[in-house]
């Protein structure tokens, strides 16, 4: 039997908990045994969405066995719902992840005249030279340009390169949009398990481009929103990035008691040399910080 679908609500409303529970009960994945097996939960959600035909068929979307941010049916409606939210409307600079599921949101940000920041996929810069964190798209004009610039390749082609080592002065993110595989109404979130959103946040936090008050949002299918017991907020680690808003095709879920954002920056000790080699943009930032610290120590020693 398919899950009972609740009536659509406006973006200003948070659905009653009872309705949310009814909607999610059929999507539950069995009992929870702490600690949560995050990888298993990710795989279960992915499998459930595949079985229920909730993913967009896309011939160029590589099926290489790697878990991806679900390119879910209805992602355009979820994006439009978020674009009507006051947090989106009053923002000047919006960062949106480069996944297919958030492509329409990137287009809506450009259409609304926002400055759009799009990180390079997996933070693996391929442009050479001084590593690029992402691209800043300003003043995209015309539907054809917006359609091109909202893609991963188009953002690189039509945007200005952004580097962590020379971040534009005064460029602060007002709305930080991430992809997710799983989320709860309490704000707990799981991505693909690679930590890319956390590393983006950590790097930008160190630069002062985001802070503890920056709003974090995601768009997702309701099948990705699970009961809080499946992913307890208490189990989140200091670097885990929670969400404040979850926009689905039929409702807006607002976290009533927002979880604290990470203030630890990039946890360099958790990044192996091999991983830093694959993400030269972080390597460049670490080297710059190391050089700065060395210069500060030299200055203190000379006094």
Image: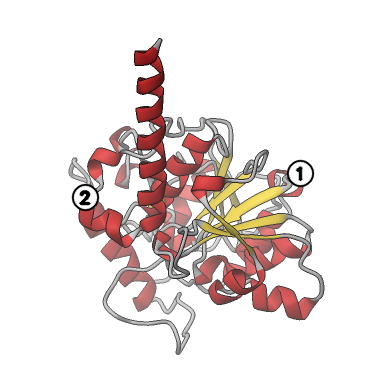
Q: Quadrant of the N terminus?
A: bottom left
Instruction: Please name whichever residue, 31 or 153, is drawn nearer the observer in this view of the structure.
Output: 153
Find residue 235 and report its horizontal and vertical position in percent: 28, 36
| Position above or below: 215 against 121 | above
| Position above or below: 254 against 163 | above
Q: Which residue is mark 1?
A: 90
Identify which residue is drawn at 54% across, 33% down: 211
Outermost residue on the top side: it is: 303
Identify which residue is drawn at 66% across, 78% down: 148
Per the image, label 2 sits on a secondary structure element best described as: loop
Q: Nearer the viewer, mark 1 or mark 2?
A: 2
Q: Quadrant of residue 143?
A: bottom right
Q: Quadrant of the C terminus?
A: top left
| Position above or below: 185 against 82 | above
Q: Is residue 242 visible?
A: no
Q: Which residue is mark 2?
A: 272
Per the image, label 1 sits on a secondary structure element best described as: loop
Residue 249 located left or right of residue 110 = left
Q: Are marks 1 and 2 in contact (CB under 8 Å)?
A: no
Q: Earlier in the sequence, mark 1 or mark 2?
A: 1
Label 1: how many residues lie within 10 Å, few (<14), some (14-19) or many (20+)?
A: few
Residue 226 located left or right of residue 255 = left
Instruction: Please name whichever residue, 209 or 77, is drawn nearer the observer in this view of the structure.
Output: 209
- How many numbered discs, if any? 2
Identify which residue is drawn at 36% across, 42% down: 286
């Amino acid at each position: 039997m398919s899950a009972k679908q609740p009536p659509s609500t406006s973006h200003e409303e948070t659905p009653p908990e009872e309705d949310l529970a009814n909607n999610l009960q059929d999507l539950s994945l069995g009992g929870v045994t702490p600690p949560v097996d995050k990888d298993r939960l990710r795989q279960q959600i992915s499998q459930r969405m595949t079985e229920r035909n909730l993913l967009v068929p896309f011939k160029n979307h590589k099926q290489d066995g790697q878990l991806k941010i679900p390119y879910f049916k209805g992602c355009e409606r979820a994006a439009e719902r978020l674009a009507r939210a006051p947090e989106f409307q009053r923002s000047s600079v919006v960062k949106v992840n480069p996944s297919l599921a958030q492509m329409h949101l990137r287009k809506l940000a450009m259409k609304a005249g926002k400055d759009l920041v799009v990180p390079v996929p997996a933070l693996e810069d391929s442009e050479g030279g001084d590593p690029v964190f992402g691209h800043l798209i300003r003043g995209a004009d015309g539907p054809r340009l917006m359609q091109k610039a909202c893609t991963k390749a188009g953002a690189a082609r039509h945007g200005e390169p952004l580097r962590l080592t020379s971040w534009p002065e005064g460029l602060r993110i007002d709305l930080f949009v991430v992809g997710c595989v799983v989320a709860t109404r309490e704000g707990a979130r799981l991505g693909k398990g690679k930590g890319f959103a956390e590393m983006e946040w950590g790097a930008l936090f160190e630069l002062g481009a985001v802070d503890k008050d920056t709003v974090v949002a995601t768009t997702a299918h309701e099948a990705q929103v699970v009961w809080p017991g499946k992913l307890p907020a208490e189990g989140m680690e200091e670097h885990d990035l929670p969400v404040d808003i979850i926009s689905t095709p039929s409702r807006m879920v607002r976290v009533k008691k927002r979880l604290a954002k990470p203030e630890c920056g990039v946890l360099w000790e958790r990044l192996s040399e091999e991983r830093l080699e694959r993400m030269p943009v972080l390597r460049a930032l670490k080297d710059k910080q190391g050089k700065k610290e060395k210069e500060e120590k030299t200055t203190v020693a000379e006094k």
